[in-house]
Amino acid sequence: MLPKFRMKWFCSVALMTLFLLPLIATAAEGTGISGDSNWPWWVWPIILFVFCFALGIVAVLAGVGGGVLYVPLVSGFFPFHIDFVRGAGLMVALAGALAAGPGLLRRNLASLRLALPVALIASTFSIIGAMLGLYLSKVNPNIVQVCLGVTIVGIAILIFLSKNTEKPVVTCQDAVGLALGISGSCLDEATKEEIHWKTHRTLLGLVMFVFIGILAGMFGLGAGWANVPVLNLLLGVPLKISVATSKFLLSITDTSAAWIYMNKGCVIPLIAIPSIIGLMFGSFVGVRLLSIAKPKFIRLMVIFVLLFAGLKAIDKGLGIGFLG
Amino acid sequence: MTEQLNKNLKPMSEQITYANLLFIGAWAGILLMLITYFIYITGIISPHVDIAVIIQNWDKGVDEYLKITNSPHGWGWLSLLNTGDFLNFVGLVLIAVLTIICYLFLVAGYQKRKDWIYFFICVFEIAVLVLAASGVLGTGGH
């Protein structure tokens, strides 16, 4: 176990990196480094790796997926076209979800009975979202940039306002939930308590995943920010099961959208691989820091970062240049 | 009663198989990415598109980028596996194909249990993912 002060140091450095590296990247873009490079090419993978490492730490501590932070920050502050950022963002979210999936499934925290019907809807519509996003980007990339900015600002507000419930009360399961047998039991390892759960308002919840799928595919975002409130607050699934199922769900939803972007040629390994590896390693460190971090403070910081990244995306899309 | 409860608390065997496959596949993919990326950036195998050309054009839209760099879309990368940059797609594709493989085990499991609703959900999901992976949708470009 690392000493407490070193862990705090790690958290502070991660947050500072998250702020500083995009600014360096913006400065580099402004001086024409992306095109007529004065810097050697290998600076870019290193910046991306370090940035994503910090992003991985902060994302775990704030309880959000990497994709939702990656896409607005990288598209807002790095010189890459939004097509490649979305492609890399989906691969980042996918790799993170795949790495977390086995543990969640083995502990029965991620529920297949809940995830499979939802995943079918979300993954189908994420294909439509991806195609729509690529089409809009072809027409005018600024449209996607502005829509992304508005979505990110909305996500920041959603995270700020949503008050998830640890154990929602579901008195009577609805017909759709009953027909699909969406219910389950698992053991809460922290309290040694058995959790039994079932769903209500299932049909409405399933419809919500149409929109979640479209947004996830369109902007290359992992959709954990939307999955959890819908599963927890609307369907009445306990928070732990919702979070775990949402993470597992991303491995399916993002797969379909990732294929569309990959087949279109939107995944550049030079950008995508340091991002994936950086975020994975950052997530491992983030998990170790969870015990000492102050999640409330980190959460507030992430809301601030999201708001800033969202406004920057709107600013960039509209070409105002207010935020640099 | 307790036995039934314990049974409910345990995941079904296909869920464990799914988890194990995911574990092996995800880590194999990440390891492959590390190796192929190392080969790529050290120049052990020369790339199809020079890194300097990528950096000069990564701010352009995908269609324009593909045209300038003469890069393929869809499964065209397969014919360029002997180049350092497209070799990286081995790891990327592995993590993108994992879910489809895992679903095949679920299909078998639900068929064995005669849980036809979930059997068809899994079959449809495989169809959706295969359709996305096939490159039939939205690969029109240059």
Image (spheres, grey):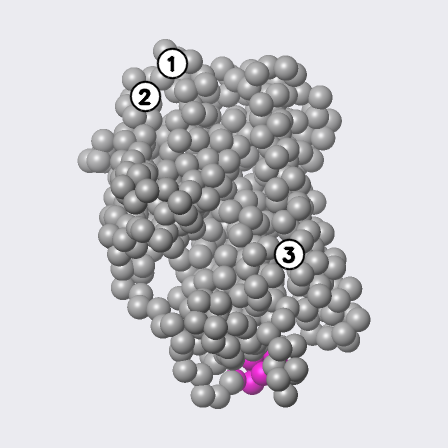
For disc 1, the neighbor class at 10 Å (few under 14, some 14 to 19, many from 20) is few
Could you tell me the amino acid type at mark 1?
Trp
Cα–Cα span, label 1 and label 3: 43 Å
Cα–Cα span, label 3 and label 2: 43 Å
Residue at 31% of width from left, 51% of height from top?
A292
* Residue B70 in view, yes or no: no
* Residue A164 in view, yes or no: yes
Residue at 66% of width from left, 63% of height from top?
B15
Residue at 27% of width from left, 59% of height from top?
A160
The reply to whether the C-beta atoms of the residues labelled 1 and 3 are less than 8 Å apart is: no
Q: Is residue A315 magenta?
A: no
Label 3 resides on the chain identified as: B
Residue located beneath label 2 in the image: A28
Cα–Cα span, label 2 and label 1: 9 Å
B125 and B10: which is toward the camera:
B10
The reply to whether the C-beta atoms of the residues labelled 2 and 1 are less than 8 Å apart is: yes
Q: Is residue A177 magenta?
A: yes
A277 and A136: which is toward the camera:
A277
Could you tell me the amino acid type at mark 2?
Ala
For disc 3, the neighbor class at 10 Å (few under 14, some 14 to 19, many from 20) is many
Marks 3 & 2 on one chain: no
Residue located beneath label 3 in the image: B19
- Which residue sits furthest right? B112
Which region of the structure is painted magenta? A174-181
Name above or below for residue A269 compared with residue A225. Answer: above
Residue located beneath label 1 in the image: A39
Q: How many marks?
A: 3
